[in-house]
Image (cartoon, rainbow, N blue to C red):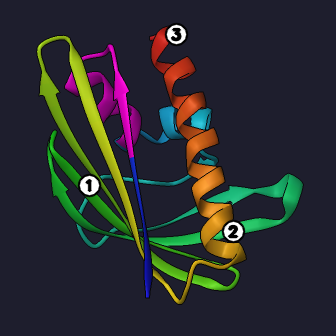
Amino acid sequence: MAHLSLEFQFESSIEKVWHALTNSDMLAKWVMENDFKPIVGHKCQFRNEQINLVVNCEVLVVEEPYKLSYTWVGGPINTVVTWTLKQEGDITYLHLEQTGFEQEDYAFKGAKYGWTDKVNELKKALEEV
């Protein structure tokens, strides 16, 4: 099994970053259209109609504003995404872990590229708030 681990930092409060991770409208700005709710057990979908992609999710952990975890099932992958947040001074550190990949294959590399790209969009969305 392979797991993806990425670190990011923001010059935003932990509350703003948490809001961007858990608010459906904010998620639509940097991930995809969705019906996400930060409630353990909530089942939702992230959808990108342009590329005919649907990702099914179930919320597993909500520890506001420090930890969020949900399943991420779409196409050939069945994984779990976990976001961990920590604030030090004016900086919020965001750790992403995605587990459940069979190996470091196309899906793994696509996820690594995809999340890095999406978090760049998150940074832009946070600047607009």
Q: Regarding mark 2 in the picture, which secondary structure is present there?
A: strand
Q: Residue at x 84, y 65 (%)?
A: 52
Question: What secondary structure is found at the residue carrying circle 3?
Answer: helix
- Rendering coords of residue 89 (x, y %): 11, 13
**Residue 51 in the image, given as x and y percentages of width and height:** 86, 59
Q: Is residue 120 above or below residue 72?
A: above
Above or below, 81 relative to 15:
below
Which residue carries the number 1 mark?
68
Separation (CA) of disc 1 from disc 3: 23 Å
- Please identify the quarter of the rendering in which residue 61 is found: bottom left
Q: Residues within 10 Å of mark 3 (few under 14, many from 20)?
A: few
Q: Is residue 77 left or right of residue 3?
A: right
Find numbered disc 1 in the image and state the secondary structure of the residue it sits on.
strand
Query: Nearer the viewer's eye, disc 2 or disc 1?
Result: 1
Q: Give the residue displayed 52% in from the left and 10% down from the top.
A: 128
Task: Identify the residue at horizontal 30%, vertical 39% (top origin).
Answer: 94
The residue identified by callout 2 is 54
Q: How many numbered circles are shown?
A: 3
What residue is pinned by disc 3?
Answer: 128
Query: Rounded to the nearest whole Å, what is the CA distance between mark 2 and mark 3?
Result: 27 Å
Residue 102 locus on image (x, y percent): 53, 89
Question: Is residue 24 located in the magenta-colored stretch of the structure?
Answer: no
Quadrant of the image containing the N terminus: bottom left
**Residue interval drawn in magenta:** 7-21
First-in-chain label (2 vs 1): 2
Q: Amino acid at mark 3?
A: Glu
Indicate left or right for 41 with 64 as reference: right
Question: Is the C terminus in the top left, top right, bottom left or bottom right quadrant?
Answer: top left
Give the x, y percent position of residue 72. Answer: 49, 71
